Image (spheres, rainbow, N blue to C red):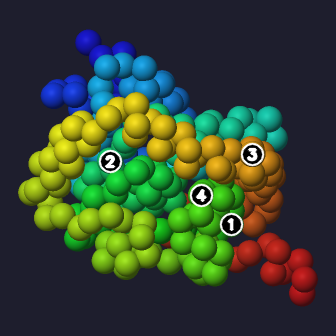
């Protein structure tokens, strides 16, 4: 029996497939899922697989933060907010610095933290109907941790546009921006991801590891500083009145009435 409740792991032909397995919640990120994914990635880094595929069960890849957790977050202490932010930063950085090739097979929406998981993989294959977006500002939150990675992927001007607007991208636009490697029909997604994995297994694992270490190493010192700053910003934002109102409005399916606007009136 698997020791993981929300993640399914399967190994075959040198490839380990990690499936986010909360289909009834659109694979939303709960603290438990984040913790399990951190442990699964650690296990995969040290097992005998050569390539990892990350995908989601059901109709979504990952819909972002779990609504039930979102609702309780407004009552958390500053220490709890910081711990949550640290845990999210840890799993995203684990993906970014993972020693083996990682392929995201994006089978549906990848929103907020889910977009981070999908696009920090070395290769991102997505179905045509997948959607991407850092929507945090819509609920009064700051996508602080992903900002450093997105800057490296698309540059500052595009990062500002995506993070400030919180808009949703279709797969074809995400592909044009370089956030998606290839668009694949749904019925071929896992087969194509596995075909890519098998081709990668023909390469030198030591050389691929060295490539990944080289690329990640260029950013290490800067990321250390940026991620620490991002954790502080993310944790602090969760204590603001705008965040509390944003969460309430989201859960009540209404437009937010931002306290920061009324404070200036």
Residue 52 at least partly seen: yes
Circle 1 sits on which residue? 140
Residue name at image x 80 percent, y 35 percent: 79
Sequence-first disc among 3 and 1: 1
**Label of residue 26 in the image:** none
Between residue 5 and residue 77, name the one nearer to us.
Answer: 5
Circle 3 sits on which residue? 221
Residue 17 at least partly seen: no
- Callout 4: 10 Å neighbours few (<14), some, many (20+)? many
Q: From the viewer's perspective, is 189 left or right of 72?
A: left
Residue name at image x 43 percent, y 75 percent: 177
| CA–CA distance in space, label 4 to label 2 | 17 Å
Sequence-first disc among 4 and 3: 4
Between residue 129 and residue 14, name the one nearer to us.
Answer: 14
Sequence-first disc among 2 and 1: 2
Q: From the viewer's perspective, is 24 left or right of 44?
A: left
| CA–CA distance in space, label 2 to label 1 | 31 Å
Q: Nearer the viewer, mark 2 or mark 1?
A: 2
- Callout 2: 10 Å neighbours few (<14), some, many (20+)? many
Secondary structure of the residue carrying numbered label 1: loop
**Label of residue 103 in the image:** 2
| CA–CA distance in space, label 4 to label 1 | 21 Å
């Amino acid at each position: 029996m698997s020791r993981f409740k929300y993640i399914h792991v399967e190994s075959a032909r040198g490839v380990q497939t990690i499936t986010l397995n909360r289909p009834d919640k659109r694979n939303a990120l709960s603290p438990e899922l984040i913790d399990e994914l951190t442990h699964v990635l650690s296990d995969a880094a040290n097992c005998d697989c050569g390539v990892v595929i990350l995908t989601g069960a059901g109709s979504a890849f990952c819909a972002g933060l779990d609504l039930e957790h979102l609702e309780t977050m407004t009552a958390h202490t500053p220490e709890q907010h910081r711990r949550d932010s640290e845990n999210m930063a840890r799993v995203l950085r684990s993906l970014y610095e993972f020693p083996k090739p990682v392929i995201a097979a994006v089978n549906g929406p990848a929103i907020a933290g889910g977009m981070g998981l999908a696009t920090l993989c070395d290769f991102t294959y997505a179905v045509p109907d997948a959607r991407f977006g850092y929507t945090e500002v819509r609920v009064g939150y700051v996508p602080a941790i992903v900002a450093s990675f997105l800057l490296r992927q698309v540059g500052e001007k595009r990062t500002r546009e995506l993070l400030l607007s919180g808009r949703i991208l279709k797969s074809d636009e995400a592909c044009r921006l370089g956030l998606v490697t290839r668009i694949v029909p749904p019925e071929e997604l896992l087969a194509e991801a596995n075909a890519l994995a098998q081709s990668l297994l023909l390469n030198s694992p030591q050389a691929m590891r060295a490539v990944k270490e080289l690329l990640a190493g260029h950013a290490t010192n800067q990321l250390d500083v940026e991620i620490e700053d991002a954790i502080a910003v993310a944790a602090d934002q969760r204590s603001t009145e705008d965040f509390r109102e944003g969460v309430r409005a989201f859960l009540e399916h209404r437009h937010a009435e931002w306290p920061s606007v009324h404070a200036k009136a």
